[in-house]
């Protein structure tokens, strides 16, 4: 992943944190930042076509979608082994921390999304 792409991940994190500042508690915001980082990084590494991030928040839930524009296979959680280092753990984190998540095929590309329940206490 190039320098510009790495900075894009940080920018998405900052934008999401700002979006959630008055909509969510600190714990949910931290989890959302981590999860969106994983999904955007996956999109940039595996598709090389960029991504569009959409976040919607209600009092009951936060939903974040990352859409890419590559017509590759839909992702599934990877089962890493001890030799993999940190590679391949993104969707495992999403599955572990999100209240719900999924993948939806689109006419061009796919949307990977997650939801966190609850909002600002």
Image (tube, grey):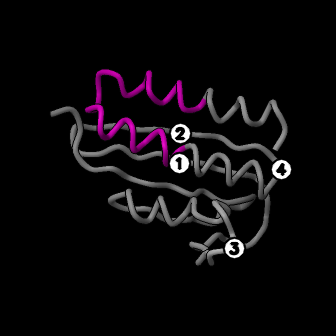
- Between 79 and 14, the one nearer to me in the picture: 79
Label 1 crowding class (10 Å Cα cut-off): few <14, some 14-19, many 20+?
many
Label 1's element?
strand
* Residue ID for mark 2: 54
4 or 1: tag closer to the N-terminus = 4
Residue at 29% over, 21% down: 22
**Magenta range:** 12-36
User: In the image, which is nearer the foreground, mark 3 or mark 2?
Assistant: 3
Q: Are marks 3 and 2 in contact (CB under 8 Å)?
A: no
3 or 1: tag closer to the N-terminus = 1
* Residue ID for mark 1: 65
Cα–Cα gap, marks 3 and 2 = 34 Å
The image quarter in which residue 111 lies = bottom right
Cα–Cα gap, marks 4 and 1 = 18 Å
The image quarter in which residue 46 lies = bottom right
Q: Is residue 31 magenta?
A: yes
* Residue ID for mark 3: 83
């Amino acid at each position: 992943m190039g320098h510009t792409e790495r900075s894009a991940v940080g920018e998405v994190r900052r934008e999401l944190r700002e979006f959630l500042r008055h909509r969510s508690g600190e714990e949910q915001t931290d989890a959302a930042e981590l999860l969106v980082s994983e999904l955007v990084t996956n999109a940039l590494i595996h598709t090389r076509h960029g991504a569009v991030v959409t976040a919607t928040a209600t009092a009951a839930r936060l939903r974040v979608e990352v859409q890419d524009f590559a017509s590759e296979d839909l992702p599934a959680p990877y089962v890493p082994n001890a030799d993999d280092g940190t590679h391949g753990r993104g969707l495992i984190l999403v599955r572990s921390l999100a209240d719900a998540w999924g993948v939806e095929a689109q006419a061009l590309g796919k949307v990977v999304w997650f939801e966190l329940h609850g909002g600002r206490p």
